Image (cartoon, grey):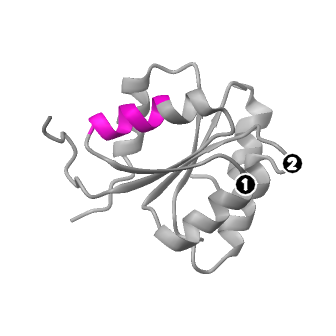
Amino acid sequence: MAADTEKPNALVLVVDDDWMNREMMQAYLTRAGFRVEVAHDAETALQKAAAFLPWLILLDVRMGEKDGFEVCQELKQNALTQSIPVLMLSALSNEEARQRAEEVGAAGFLTKTMHLSKMIEHVKKFLPSA
């Protein structure tokens, strides 16, 4: 299947503690032409972000010991990863969660109930310019 992105080598790091969500997003992003790495917890996310330097991170808010807000804040405090855009993903759609995402440096906030094609549209907004 041909990639429909302008940058077929663009790497997205998907971070979610739910295996089904990870696999679904990985499959959908791969079909859309992105390269995808996945992480199931905060520590793995931080390690993979520093090792692979993805051009975008899709980060779940609710995870195990460390939530996505804390992970985003750590990414933004690390000189190596601070410029990587982070899109927070959550079933929460309230204004408080959106504001908290903004406070920790997230580039955006998407609800998980959004149709996956809409998620791809949002992801494409963060493609690096040529």
Residue drawn 57% across the image and 27% down it: 20
From this viewpoint, is residue 111 visible? Answer: no
Q: Quadrant of the C terminus?
A: bottom left
Above or below residue 7? Residue 125 is above
> Which residue is labeled 2 in the image?
65
Disc number for residue 125: none
From this viewpoint, is residue 54 visible? Answer: yes
N-term mark: 1 or 2: 1
Q: Secondary structure at mark 1?
A: helix
Q: Is residue 115 left or right of residue 94?
A: left
Q: Main secondary structure of the magenta part?
A: helix
Give the camera-side residue of 1 and 99: 1
Residue drawn 67% across the image and 76% down it: 78
User: Which residue type does callout 2 highlight?
Assistant: Glu
Give the camera-side residue of 86 and 20: 20
Residue drawn 72% across the image and 40% down it: 61
- Count up the numbered dots: 2
Occupied quadrant, residue 92: top right
Above or below residue 20? Residue 43 is below
Q: Tell me if label 1 and label 2 are in contact, CB under 8 Å.
A: yes
Q: Secondary structure at mark 2?
A: loop
Local crowd size for mark 1, using a 10 Å CA cut-off: few (<14), some (14–19), many (≥20) = many
Residue 86 placement (x, y as % from top left): 56, 53
Occupied quadrant, residue 71: bottom right
Q: Is residue 88 magenta?
A: no
Above or below residue 89? Residue 83 is below
Mark 1 → mark 2, Cα distance in angstroms? 8 Å
Residue 43 placement (x, y as % from top left): 72, 60
For the record, the magenta segment spans 24-32
> Which residue is labeled 1 in the image?
42
Residue drawn 47% across the image and 33% down it: 25
